[in-house]
Image (spheres, rainbow, N blue to C red):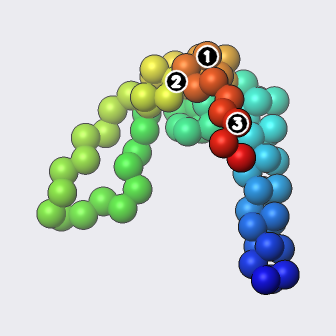
């Protein structure tokens, strides 16, 4: 279990560092400041429209992302 706990802690730390870096740079964490959301796992059988980022409303700003995504207490 220590290995699994170590991996989970590493993953949480990595995500916290990424969020801090995005906050510092003023970029949306979902689209990395591009304003466009690219779906992962494209397939020839499913059509995924590429469009503006839903989490920041296409602006790419961290402030807009934070306003539209309030912090949750689920962790």
Of all residues, the one furthest to the left in this rendering is 45
Q: On the picture, is 47 further left or further right than 61?
A: left
Give the label, 2 or 3, closer to the camera: 3
Q: Tell me, yes or no, if residue 47 can be seen here.
A: yes
Cα gap from disc 1 to disc 2, whole angstroms: 8 Å
Q: Earlier in the sequence, mark 3 or mark 1?
A: 1
Instruction: Name the mark on residue 34.
Output: none
Q: Using the numbered discs, state the Cα–Cα distance from disc 2 to disc 3 in whole angstroms.
A: 21 Å
Q: How many neighbours does mark 3 have within 10 angstroms: few (below 14), some (14-19), or many (20 or more)?
A: few
Tell me which numbered mark, 2 or 3, is placed earlier along the sequence: 2
On the image, numbered disc 2 is attached to which residue? 56
Rendered image quadrant of residue 4: bottom right
Q: Is residue 70 above or below residue 44?
A: above
If you read the primary sequence from the N terminus, does the residue marked by circle 1 or circle 2 appear first? 2
| Residue at the image position 67 percent from the left and 17 percent from the top | 63
**Residue assigned mark 3:** 73
> Could you tell me residue 1's position as x and y percent?
79, 83
| 10 Å crowding of disc 2: few (<14), some (14-19), many (20+) | many
> Where residue 66 sits: x, y (%)?
65, 22
Kindly state the secondary structure of the residue where label 1 is placed.
helix
When the figure is inspected, residue 21 is found, relative to residue 54, above or below; the finding is: below
- SS assignment at label 2: loop
The answer to which image quadrant residue 41 occupies is bottom left
Question: Which residue in the structure is indicated by mark 1?
Answer: 67
Report x, y in % for residue 24.
81, 30
Q: Is residue 18 visible?
A: no
């Amino acid at each position: 279990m220590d290995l699994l706990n170590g991996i989970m802690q590493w993953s949480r730390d990595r995500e916290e560092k990424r969020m801090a870096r995005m906050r510092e740079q003023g970029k949306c964490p979902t689209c990395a400041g591009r304003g466009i959301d690219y779906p992962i796992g494209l397939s020839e059988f499913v059509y995924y429209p590429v469009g503006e980022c839903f989490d920041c409303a296409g602006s790419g700003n961290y402030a807009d992302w934070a306003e539209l995504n309030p912090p949750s207490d689920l962790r």
